[in-house]
Image (cartoon, rainbow, N blue to C red):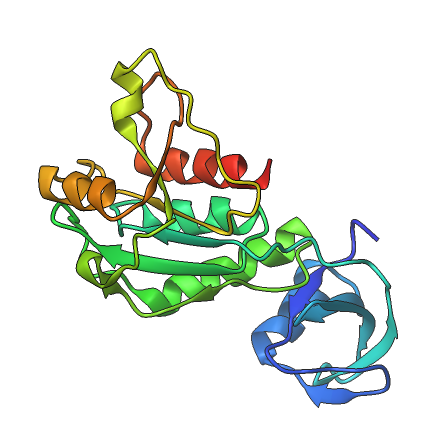
Amino acid sequence: MKNIPRIFIDHEIKTGDSFPIDKSVSHYLSHVMRTQKCLVFGFGHEFNAELSADGKTIKVGTDTGRADVVTDITLYFSPIKRTDDLIAMVTQMGIKKFVPVITERTVNHHVNWERMQKIAIESAEQSNCNSVPEIVAPIKFGELDLSGLCFADERFAYNKNNTTQVPKNAKAILVGPEGGFSDAEFDALDKLGAIPVSLGKTILRAEVAAVIAIEKILK
């Protein structure tokens, strides 16, 4: 099944359903992939499916029975210049939700979130996820409940005595912007009970830091 194209369907589907398909999807299947057969997925399930002869509808077949690899993890992140890369890479790791957080040093305040959602869909299609992560509206750093929230702490890159362990039940982590958290934000993180997590001894690009941070939670 690995060479069969996967199409995300943004509504509940079941075996026997038939529904109209966008012309761009029809063209992709018929003229790019040169096949009528595909897999359709969404909301945790994946089904065999087939494009109609006229290219206007898709008929849903049997459930493939393949379990969803998406986990119940949320990434809190500051929008960065390469937010598209961050969304694409982290989606492939199987997370449930993205929460953009506006920090003091956030530089990208004009993200096209509709485009980011499309990138998440494409990444889920390619990576065998049966669900697409939700991208919620941005919030301010001051709105975060920091108590017990894991966060990527770049200060550990200069500290040889890191013994921080990620809690086994951790379901979320926060990563900062390109310039890191401000002194005031570090002060709030420290005082309000956030859990610092080391990403290693080097300073990482923000999008790479997000990937490593999720890996820490997945372990």
- For residue 199, which quarter of the picture? top left
Front residue of 219/148: it is 148
Which residue corresponds to the image point at 59% horizontal and 78% vertical from the top-left?
Answer: 10
Question: Which quadrant holds the C terminus?
Answer: top right
> How many numbered marks appear?
0
- For residue 159, which quarter of the picture? top left
Residue 14 visible? The answer is yes
Where residue 138 appears, as percent x and y from the top left, is 27, 65
Residue 105 relative to residue 216: left or right: left
Q: Find the residue positioned furthest to the top.
A: 160
Where residue 154 appears, as percent x and y from the top left, is 28, 28
Front residue of 38/54: it is 38
Residue 5 relative to residue 90: left or right: right
- For residue 194, which quarter of the picture? top left
Residue 180 relative to residue 170: left or right: left
Front residue of 62/96: it is 96
Where residue 152 appears, as percent x and y from the top left, is 34, 36
Which residue corresponds to the image point at 20% horizontal and 36% vertical from the top-left?
Answer: 180
